[in-house]
Image (spheres, coloured by chain):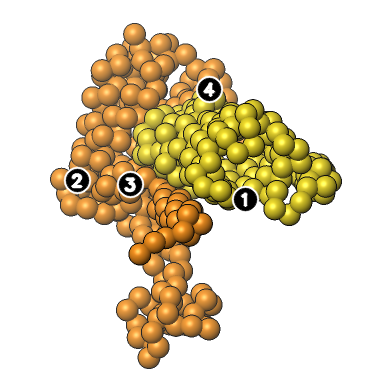
Amino acid sequence: MGKTLRVIAAALLLTLVLSAEGRAQDWFWGVEYMVSSSTGDTRDFVKDFSFRNFAVEGRNMVKDNVSVGLYLGWNVFAEKTDSLIEFNEATTVSGVQFRYVNAFPIMATAHYYFGQRRGIRPYVGTGLGTYYAENRLEIGTVAFQDKNWHLGVAPEVGVVIPISWNARAILNARYNYGLKSGGTKLSYFTFGVGIGWL
Amino acid sequence: MSVSPRKLVQGIALAGAALGLGLGAACYPGSIEGVQEMDVVVTVRDTSANFANFLLYAMPDTVVQLNDTAEGSVELSHEYDSLMIATVEQNMAARGYVRVNIPDEPDDLPQDSVPDLLVLVTMVGVENSYYVWYPGWGYWGWWPGWGYWPGYGPGWGWGYPGYVGRATYETGTVFVDLIDPNDPSLGVEPPEIPVVWTGALRGILSGGAATTQTRIVDGLNQAFDQSPYLRRN
């Protein structure tokens, strides 16, 4: 946990330093709604195409084609299943289960933009930071919950589309990957539509 | 009437945020559809046991309740005993095992009829409880300690808009244990019964007779079905 906090602090500090030269009006704030699909270890636990994803972010244009910022999100995966649980070679459990993953990415971000400042701007970027994730399994009258902090990255591609002099629409696709923590990795895609204003 | 682009954008943003928060809050799938969905089947095996080596087994016709005098236990009905025994016997037969009867005098048992396995069916009933707070009573409502005073409980009016209650539910668990009486660990100290397989069916005690019978049969069948290694042939 101490290591995770240091990484978060360093990422936030880096964001502030890089954005210090930016003017106040260069901050770009946005809200984003996403759909998501679990993959890898996360899909092994919860198979879900989720409509329950939300994020807010701020980007500071430190150059005409570069921004650094902050990203806070909430992604929910849930599944009702009756698949077998095999703890080890000896033990098997069956029954209707409700499985949940609540993941909260907390990221410093950097983006590079193509195109002109007032035009349609495709971009590539990445987030670097941490995910707080709660995995929960309910079966019968009992529940098991696992809470972990994952160091992680979130590479992203997208496009910013001007819709007024100070408003922008955002379309993006992001891969979220959290390093192994508590015996499991975190892995999912999000596809978002957002709106932001300068 | 005209709306400025800025107001329009902010309105769309707020609507999007509200939509996202709403979808996020209403975030979990479905719900339990009947008490049978609370049933859980657990099986555990001795990985060193070779179940193809067993053929004959003995099984008492009685289902014993293990904790019927323990505090918090629930007296379970024995009306399903024969159903449990029959279901276990059918599953054992389907997997190539043969039931033998044990005579009152063990010496009367022919040598070629000595069972390789003992199968015991037992059950446990437990009352589970937890404290719930029905909101609305205000400052003191958070304190679950109110539930300790006799006479308080669900439905008891406080003269205030809210109350604390003790909710209970009862669970029953059926165990099927396969014991290897020829295991060399039998008789060693400290005493340890050499169980080579256990199937446990745990569920909430609720529902009518037909539902209960179905849950028992389905649960016991599931215990055997999720143990593909448990077979003679």
Mark 4 and mark 3 on one chain? no
Chain A, colour shown: yellow
- How far apart marks 1 and 4 lie (CA) works out to 57 Å
Q: Amino acid at mark 4?
A: Glu
Compare residues B28 and A156 and report the one nearer the observer: A156
- How far apart marks 3 and 2 lie (CA) works out to 22 Å
Kindly state the secondary structure of the residue where label 4 is placed: loop
Tag of residue A89: 4
Q: Residues within 10 Å of mark 2 (few under 14, many from 20)?
A: few
Q: Chain of mark 3?
A: B
Kindly state the secondary structure of the residue where label 3 is placed: loop
Task: Answer with the quarter of the image where residue A60 lies.
Answer: top right
Q: Which of the two discs, 4 and 3, sits closer to the camera?
A: 3
Q: Amino acid at mark 1?
A: Leu
Mark 1 and mark 3 on one chain? no
Question: In this rendering, does residue A194 appear at all?
Answer: no
- How far apart marks 1 and 3 lie (CA) works out to 40 Å
Residue B152, position in %: x, y?
A: 40, 81
- How far apart marks 4 and 3 lie (CA) works out to 32 Å
Q: Is residue B120 left or right of residue A196?
A: left
